[in-house]
Image (tube, helix red, strand yellow):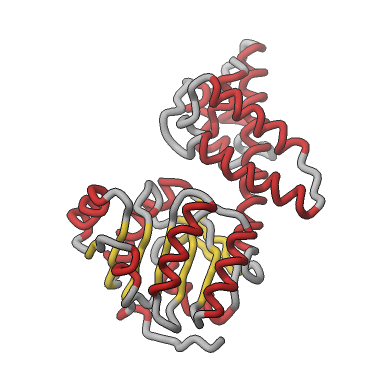
Amino acid sequence: MHLKRKKMKSTNVAFLGLGVMGFPMAGHLQKAGFNVTVYNRTQEKAQRWQDTYKGAQAATIESAVSHADVVFMCVGNDNDVLAVATKALDNMKADAVLVDHTTASATVARQLGSEAKQRNIGFLDAPVSGGEAGAVNGQLTIMVGGTDEVFNRIKPVMDVYARHSQRLGPTGSGQLAKMMNQICIAGIVQGLAEALHFGQQAGLDCDAVIEVISKGAAQSWQMENRALTMLKGEYEFGFAVDWMRKDLAIALDEARRNGSTLPLTALVDQFYADVQKSGGGRWDTSSLLSRLS
């Protein structure tokens, strides 16, 4: 498939899904000078986006994507991805590109990549890391699967809201990399939660301890950004436990498929189930400490 190269700043962009991530991401594109049309199932949110950023909104997916050179989507799960992407692909023009920022399965990514290719449409699976703050500040990390040709064409657009974007292999590679990302986070947060629990039980000034050990080998993003709020029992923000369990389920399913052994990930997934049972499904993932306290 040969995709024509176009001058990106005159590109017509559609963005499907205006959740906590998509809303600011689409806003960055509009502020950067792209012609952005958004679609969201809840029209009130699309109207709020339009009032905030002065872009356009569409009443249907079909009308949002029909003239777009690039279509971005950021929705909920595999079923949402398939439902939205199918409508998009059926109504996109040839030589356009569909970029899925949803964290979903590699299986769905490969399916969509194949369907896009049949229509002479480019496709990238491009899950993101950095959370709501990264989206708002335009500092996301993007893990990408797809061809070099399509990635190089779309990278200047994604750079509007990315700190770093990188192609990691063929279609599906972005999603596999995001699984690795979530596996790492699960283990690190559990280790941090246990360390803080240990320190509290030992009667230490944990704020002071964190100040010291965060300067050494124990340092992590989670320690720098979550340790103090964990000590205060503050969890009403950040990346929700419900979404983390969705992501870990995808990773564990892929592990069964490729023969990986993920005992720690499976265990932490069950710990997150405990948090859900206690009413913390919408709490930040750092809430693992709550089940130890």
- In the rendered image, residue 276, in percent from the top left (x then y), is placed at 54, 26
In the image, what residue occupies the spot 44% across and 53% down? 75
Q: Position of residue 269 (x, y in %)?
A: 65, 34
Residue drawn at 46 percent across, 46 percent down: 131
Image position of 80 with respect to 203: above or below: below
204 is higher (above) or lower (below) than 16: above
Q: How many marks?
A: 0
Q: Is residue 281 left or right of residue 201?
A: left
Task: Name the side, left or right, on which 217 lies relative to 246.
Answer: right
Question: Considering depth in this image, is 133 or 84 the residue closer to the camera?
Answer: 84
Vertical position of residue 163 compared to residue 211: above or below: below
The N terminus appears in which quarter of the rendering? bottom right
Q: Residue at x 61, y 15 (%)?
A: 200
Q: Residue at x 59, y 27 (%)?
A: 288
Question: How far across and down, in percent of the image, does residue 31 sit?
Answer: 27, 64
Residue 172 in view of the camera: yes
Q: Which quadrant does the C terminus fall into?
A: top right
